[in-house]
Image (spheres, rainbow, N blue to C red):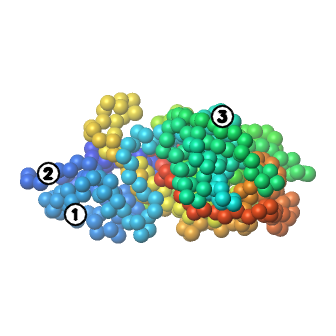
């Protein structure tokens, strides 16, 4: 395969992208724009327009992003000046009729830390939604991140939040659950259900901090007759954790697993290279870096379709990166062999790079989904910034603003040329976590309904041997939880160095 590198747009636009066939010294031709004499030049709005004109997946169908805008520079700058903020311009240029996922970035440095798994958080992942039981409103904790403030306070999967900052949640005030995402300190009242009855257990005061959150939430090996079943709860495709990801599969391989259940219920996506590496660990029978075994094919807009090198193969080595996305080396990959089926636990939160695993492996093995219909995000993005600093010299930035963008720039296809999952993957066995909201089991518990359904299929069953919790029904209350944009994302590495040749 050819040496991989990335395009960049001369001086004005630097894009965190990879996998094109040109050398790093080559640049696409960019019109040189001189500032008109009478009209004020809006540098940041100019960056927004040019970035979307160059990369946006739907650029060719949007008159506002047509190349002809540059034919009359005074008219072009008048157009830019019609928008009082760059965010307003960005929102006017993206096509919300087809695009739910592009977003504006006010602070690129903060965004890149969040992509790497470092953010300011309590370390609590909430369950599938708020529910009403009698007069009260509740939500369960799906998991707490290891070593997070919440985990250090003893909170864990299955705990149920009923009180926030001294207020017991009810149908009038349940929006206070969003204090988890807006405040630096919070007091939570939590309890547990037993036999359908909720009992408060404790109140905890937590301060959120900035920390690195591992996506490798839980893994174990279950022995069921002649089956050795690996079970892995993976919560995000985060590039600084490739070594830890490989360590999980090293353990699976050492224990000789012959079945795998991949729990992606709480995984909204992440980096494309991480998805490709995980797929390579799961299907070790694929030849490495071969044109005969394609995991994913990224297809860009008509202006970028001349770029080669957007095909992701299967790999034999793990590419390692630091938190800024810079390549630091490789390590041998632990690849499983002999798997003919993959069982994936899904939910309406399963998106992007998680769906890429399902789609990318289907040409090679049977992929069985259990749970909820996935989001249906078959596109991906890049981080676009204006004249960024070099990683070795942060003071080299040529502009003073912090603005960036995360536009959709590609659609992703598997080896069969299939990208037809815009409505999500419908599960073979449909399960809703809300049906078990009063009886959340620990990860790895064989009676946990989603895992139990997978185990039943592995052991020769034809359907899920699970029953909905029948000791009093609960009622879902909308979805008022304000999740950040990047919770359901698929993107390329910030350094443009997905892998080396």
Query: Tag 1: Cα neighbours inside 10 Å, few (<14), some, or many (≥20)?
Result: some
302 left or right of 271? left
Query: Tag 2: Cα neighbours inside 10 Å, few (<14), some, or many (≥20)?
Result: few
Residue 371 makes an appearance in the image? no
In depth, the one of 371 and 188 nearer the eye is: 188
Residue 221, percent across and down?
80, 44
In depth, the one of 200 and 219 nearer the eye is: 200
Residue 254 makes an appearance in the image? yes
Q: Looking at the image, which residue is at 75% across and 47% down?
A: 199
**Disc 3 element:** loop
Q: Which residue is mark 2?
A: 40
Q: How many angstroms separate mark 1 from mark 2 (CA)?
A: 17 Å
In depth, the one of 26 and 362 nearer the eye is: 362
Q: Nearer the viewer, mark 3 or mark 2?
A: 3
**Disc 1 element:** helix
489 left or right of 78? right
Mark 1 touches mark 3? (CB < 8 Å): no
Q: Nearer the viewer, mark 1 or mark 2?
A: 2
Q: Which residue is mark 1?
A: 69
Mark earlier in primary sequence (1, 3): 1
Mark earlier in primary sequence (3, 2): 2
Q: Quadrant of residue 449?
A: bottom right
In depth, the one of 190 and 447 nearer the eye is: 190
The extreme left residue here reads: 38
Q: How many angstroms separate mark 1 from mark 3 (CA)?
A: 56 Å
Task: State the mark number for residue 203.
Answer: none
Q: Looking at the image, which residue is at 42% across and 57% down?
A: 102
Mark 1 touches mark 2? (CB < 8 Å): no
Q: How many angstroms separate mark 3 from mark 2 (CA)?
A: 55 Å
Task: State the mark number for residue 153.
Answer: 3
Residue 500, percent across and down?
51, 41
**Disc 2 element:** loop
């Amino acid at each position: 395969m050819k040496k991989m590198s990335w395009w960049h747009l001369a001086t004005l636009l630097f894009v965190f992208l990879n996998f094109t066939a040109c050398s790093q010294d080559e640049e696409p031709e960019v019109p040189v724009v001189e500032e008109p004499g009478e009209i004020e030049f809006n540098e940041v709005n100019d960056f927004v327009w040019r970035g979307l004109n160059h990369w946006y997946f739907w650029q060719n169908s949007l008159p506002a992003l047509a190349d002809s805008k540059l034919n009359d520079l005074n008219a072009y700058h008048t157009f830019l000046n019609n928008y009082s903020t760059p965010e307003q311009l960005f929102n006017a240029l993206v096509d919300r009729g087809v695009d739910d996922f592009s977003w504006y970035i006010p602070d690129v440095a903060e965004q890149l830390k969040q992509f790497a798994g470092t953010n300011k958080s309590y370390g609590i992942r909430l369950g599938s939604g708020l529910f009403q039981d009698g007069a009260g409103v509740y939500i369960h904790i799906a998991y707490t991140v290891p070593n997070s403030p919440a985990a250090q306070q003893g909170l864990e999967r299955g705990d149920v939040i009923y009180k926030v900052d001294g207020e017991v949640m009810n149908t009038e005030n349940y929006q206070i659950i969003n204090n988890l995402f807006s405040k630096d300190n919070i007091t939570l009242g939590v309890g547990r259900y037993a036999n359908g009855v909720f009992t408060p257990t404790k109140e905890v005061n937590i301060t959120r901090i900035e920390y690195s959150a591992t996506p490798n939430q839980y893994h174990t090996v279950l022995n069921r007759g002649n089956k050795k079943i690996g079970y892995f709860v993976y919560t995000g495709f985060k590039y600084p954790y490739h070594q830890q990801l490989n360590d999980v599969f090293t353990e699976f391989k050492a224990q000789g697993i012959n079945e795998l259940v991949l729990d992606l219920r709480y995984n909204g996506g992440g980096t494309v290279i991480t998805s490709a590496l995980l797929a390579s660990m799961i299907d070790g029978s694929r030849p490495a870096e071969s044109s005969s075994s394609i995991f994913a094919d990224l297809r860009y807009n008509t202006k970028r379709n001349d770029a080669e090198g957007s095909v992701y193969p299967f790999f034999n080595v793990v590419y390692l990166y630091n938190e800024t996305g810079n390549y630091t080396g490789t390590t041998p990959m632990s690849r499983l062999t002999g798997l003919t089926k993959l069982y994936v636990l899904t939910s309406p939160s399963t998106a992007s790079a998680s769906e890429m695993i399902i789609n990318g492996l289907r040409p090679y093995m049977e992929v069985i989904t259990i749970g909820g219909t996935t989001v249906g995000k078959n596109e991906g993005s890049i981080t676009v910034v204006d004249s960024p600093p070099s990683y070795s010299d942060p003071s080299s930035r040529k502009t003073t603003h912090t603005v960036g963008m995360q536009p959709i720039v590609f659609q992703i296809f598997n080896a069969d040329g299939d990208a037809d999952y815009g409505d999500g993957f419908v599960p073979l066995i449909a399960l809703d976590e809300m049906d078990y909201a009063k009886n959340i089991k620990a990860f790895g518990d064989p009676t946990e309904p989603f895992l139990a359904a997978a185990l039943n299929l592995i052991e020769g069953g034809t359907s899920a041997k699970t029953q909905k919790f029948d000791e009093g029904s609960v009622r879902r209350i909308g979805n008022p939880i304000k999740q950040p944009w990047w919770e359901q994302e698929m993107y390329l590495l910030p350094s443009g160095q997905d892998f080396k040749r």
